[in-house]
Amino acid sequence: MSRERAGAGVRTLVEPTLSEAAAAMADALEHGDLLTVFGRCAVDYDGRASSTLGPGDRHVTAKPDGTVLVHTDERQQPVNWQPPGCSQRVEHGEGDAADSGTDELRLVSTRSNPDEELVVAFESVRQVSAFAVDDGETLSLTGSEEDLRQRILDSPELVEPGFQPLVTERRTAAGAVDIFGEDADGNVVVVELKRKRVGPDAVGQLSRYVDALERDLHADATVRGILVAPSVTERARRMLADRGLEFSAVEPPSDGE
Amino acid sequence: MSRERAGAGVRTLVEPTLSEAAAAMADALEHGDLLTVFGRCAVDYDGRASSTLGPGDRHVTAKPDGTVLVHTDERQQPVNWQPPGCSQRVEHGEGDAADSGTDELRLVSTRSNPDEELVVAFESVRQVSAFAVDDGETLSLTGSEEDLRQRILDSPELVEPGFQPLVTERRTAAGAVDIFGEDADGNVVVVELKRKRVGPDAVGQLSRYVDALERDLHADATVRGILVAPSVTERARRMLADRGLEFSAVEPPSDGE
DNA sequence: CGATGAATCTCGACA
DNA sequence: TGTCGAGGTTCATCG
């Protein structure tokens, strides 16, 4: 094993013994560092569901906020994980390492409500690192549904000429409508926004809003439902036609706009 | 900077220069290793949406399958990422490092269909590691919707006494029904399964199935729709009542069952 | 390849 | 705290 002392923020052990790894991991958890461990391990999870994962090489991350991630060499998603807010502890059987074939280092993460437990049992550890993280910057994102809503409010004619938004997030018996307004003839208009190509679910949603409002408002009121999105699937287009609903093609704004 | 040569599978540089880091990163990408970099960086993404993230300490992972993950010290989800199948390259301005304030190391990940680009621009690198991963084990999970389906097929009386499953995944004009069967009186029964508490969407789905089957089958057939899940939201319960649909509380099996 | 629906979804917002 | 809906959702499956 060898120790690397880097600038204040990084402590790394390469090819440590399990005892050394255990100490380094406990230390990192204690100090609120970002902990990473690479080694051969088996993983068991029990909680909302249950899973077992046999031995293999994996990269394990424990964040100071209580998150645990177990990654293999494939996939974007971790093969096992624990959400933020969990408690981590390191367990190491203190038997004589020389002839104990059962020597094992375990990282255990627990949570309550719901009760969940993740156990990462290391046969061997190739590297342990502890990082002191100073971030502080927040992400700024464009192109979301919120941006599309702002775009419609800025330029209501994108939905149709004469459209007038009145309220956003208007409550109905079926939930909150994205944009509530009226058309050039004074008819009530319900707008459902989707930032990308929409399927049948969105039509069902819009349909429920229109029905709810027709019950809420005077029985003689005409309520139009317009689905605003970049495009629709064929099945959704047929559902719209069946229900007398409409579609208006609008793209969410791109970065520059 | 110092170099660590570990057993075959791990190569790590601590506090490298940007040139050294660039070489190690390119080497790892070339060899199909799991690459991790910790350092101060800014991140820009442009594709399905756009985002910018100012300078800060982050942990960056590049997997041999083309996945890229940028993690901060908080959250389970990466702050930026690229899905599997992307192409990575390392760019390093080869200016004289001495007086060039603009010296920069960039990890660029691109993808097409849709066109997306992620750029991680490092001001400094604290550690670079390359791991040769040998996994090979696959995850086995219980508690899924498939498990719930099996539970119902094993014990149909959990839905209601006398219920008889006939077909799973039966096709209708509105999509495939989870379980199609009949009750003690010989009425057609459509069962929609959800492994957790359900909201209005599932009711809409079940409702579409029942409507479609009433059209498909003889006009005189009675089609019952039963939503099977651990629980329902209040709004969904009202929607069920409105539409003459039913609910039956069943938990998905836990590990031991 | 696109379309569909599940997920230990995660995450933020709001009652 | 629970509920609700969005997401650069991701992911597997199916046509």
Image (cartoon, coloured by chain):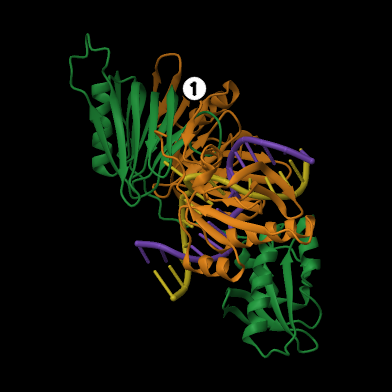
Chain colours: A orange, B green, C purple, D yellow
- What kind of element bears circle 1? loop
Please tell me which residue is depicted at 63% across the width and 67% down the height of the picture: B147
Quarter-of-image position of residue B203: bottom right
Residue B146 is situated, as x and y percent measured from the top left of the image, at 60, 67
Instruction: Answer left or right for A12 relative to A186.
Output: left
Q: Which residue is mark 1?
A: A135
Any part of residue A155 in sight: yes
Quarter-of-image position of residue B50: top left
Q: Give amino acid for label 1.
A: Asp
Nearer to the camera, A100 or B248:
B248
With respect to residue B38, does B61 lie above or below? Answer: below
Q: What residue occupies the far top of the structure in this picture?
A: B99
Quarter-of-image position of residue A204: bottom right
Q: Quadrant of the C terminus of chain B?
A: bottom right
Instruction: Answer left or right for A107 relative to B21.
Output: right
With respect to residue A120, does A3 lie above or below? Answer: above
Please tell me which residue is depicted at 75% across the width and 85% down the height of the picture: B222
With respect to residue A125, does A196 lie above or below? Answer: below
Q: Quadrant of the N terminus of chain B?
A: top left
Residue B19 is situated, as x and y percent measured from the top left of the image, at 23, 23
Please tell me which residue is depicted at 49% across the width and 28% down the height of the picture: A20
Residue A244 is situated, as x and y percent measured from the top left of the image, at 60, 66
Any part of residue B255 in sight: no
Nearer to the camera, A129 or B103:
B103
Subunit bearing disc 1: A
